[in-house]
Amino acid sequence: MSADPGIVIVGASLAGAKAAQALRLDHGYDRPITLVGDEPHLPYERPALSKGYLLGTTETRELDVLEPRFYSDQDITLALGAPATVLDLDARRVRTAGAAEFAFSRVLIATGSRAGNLQVPGAGLVGVHYLRDRDDSEHLGEALRAADHVVIVGAGWLGSELAAASHALGNRTTVIDPLPTPLYTVLGDEIGGLFARRHRDHGVDLLTGDGVEAVLGTHAVEAVRTIKGRRIPADLVIVGVGAVPNTELAEAAGLRVDGGILADRHLRTSHPAAVAAGDVARHQHPRYLNPVRIEHWDNAVVHGTAAAATLLDKPVTIDHVPYFFSTQYGSTLEYVGYPTRWDRVVTRGEPDAPGFTAFWLDGATPVAAMTIDNWGAADHLRALVAAAHPADPRRLADAGTPLPDLLPSAPSRAL
């Protein structure tokens, strides 16, 4: 019998690195592990790319998922700087653009996602930037420091953080989004409106209900023209219009793909040798009717650990309540949940004060929650959403009711 060739992880990402770590440390896996990545860098965490790393307050080494020596200490082969170009699931082999070839018994696909493109005239001009990887962040940071008027396309999580970063560097900043408020699809009109006010209170020109018709200039960006006919001077345009999962390798290999690599609640794909994790995976989730694809840091960590177990035929169910955090204008917000619908929002506290909290309710059941500058609260909010149990809106709104007392097992106190 031939020796087990081991596991190949395609994608030197947060999920990929966490899977390698779990294989070695949690499961004692002693066969070969190969980590294939298209970037030349060791696996790194991405949240700081639009925050501290972009602003120059976070050092490169602080981005590392694991200590650099971990990979050699744990006998993990690194094949970096050349993307995987062929995945042959029948032959159990991966080939890279650098002509390297690796055999495997199981493969983890953690190829992540890429920035969505702006599809308008002038989108290819010098001065139009995207932010997805470490190199993007370094180049964008340099451009922001040299800029005067920055236009940001998109007011989602990324666009909002970039607006705050541009403002911190002293740039005139305009944000354009076709929806009624920032983060409208996630937060809705009421809470999205609070974020709109926060942008404007910091001097950011927020144009909602409008879009970009063209980027103007001969060689480099000079202005942006909106669908409503506004002409906005600009020497830097940053595009934040969503992300596209990198499914091409998986699709060419014959895996089922639909808005991501389709997987079950254990991250198993349509081929028994392949598991998918991170941004690229669209998997079944016991809390949600339809498969979900989530691009948050926390999700990649959970996926990496779970994928390691599944690769070794010890599957665990992915059933966590999603968590996300963002830093904007000196405040940190934490959000839990993945609601597909809600019919009411209940708030406690003042919007501009630390501890402000919002609850999204489907009927009387909290399906999502958010808090601002309230470290330690997210665990309680996550437990509340995970309980999927009706809650008294009066108690949710009452800042005098401690968050742990909102959980179903906690005794009710008269208001």
Image (spheres, rainbow, N blue to C red):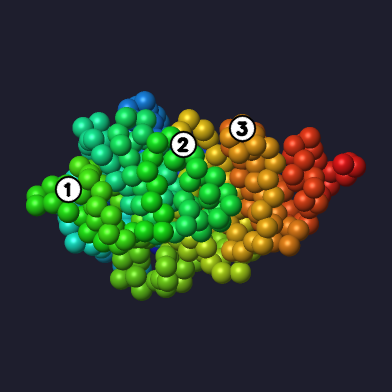
Front in this rendered view, residue 41 or 166: 166
Q: Is residue 354 above or below residue 272?
A: above
Which quarter of the image is occupied by the N terminus? bottom left
Cα distance, mark 2 to mark 1? 27 Å
Residue plotted at (17% across, 47% down)? 222
Q: Which residue is mark 1?
A: 221
Residue plotted at (66% across, 53% down)? 345
Q: Which mark is residue 310?
A: none
Question: Could you tell me residue 105's position as x and y percent?
Answer: 40, 60
Cα distance, mark 3 to mark 1? 39 Å
In screen coordinates, is 232 left or right of 408?
left
Question: Could you tell me residue 272's position as x and y percent?
Answer: 47, 68
Q: Quadrant of residue 235?
A: top left
Amino acid identity at mark 3: Ala
Question: For the residues carrying marks 2 and 1, which lies nearer the camera in this image?
Answer: 2
Residue plotted at (13% across, 51% down)? 217
Question: Could you tell me residue 120's position as x and y percent?
Answer: 23, 62
Q: Which residue is mark 3?
A: 353
Mark 3 near mark 1, Cβ–Cβ under 8 Å? no
Q: Earlier in the sequence, mark 3 or mark 2?
A: 2
Amino acid identity at mark 1: Val
In screen coordinates, is 13 left or right of 26?
left
Q: Is residue 341 visible?
A: yes
SS type, badge 1:
loop
Q: Earlier in the sequence, mark 3 or mark 1?
A: 1
Cα distance, mark 3 to mark 2? 14 Å
Q: Which mark is residue 201?
A: 2
Question: Could you tell me residue 133's position as x and y percent?
Answer: 31, 44
Which quarter of the image is occupied by the C terminus? top right
Residue plotted at (32% across, 47% down)? 152
Q: Residue furthest left?
A: 218
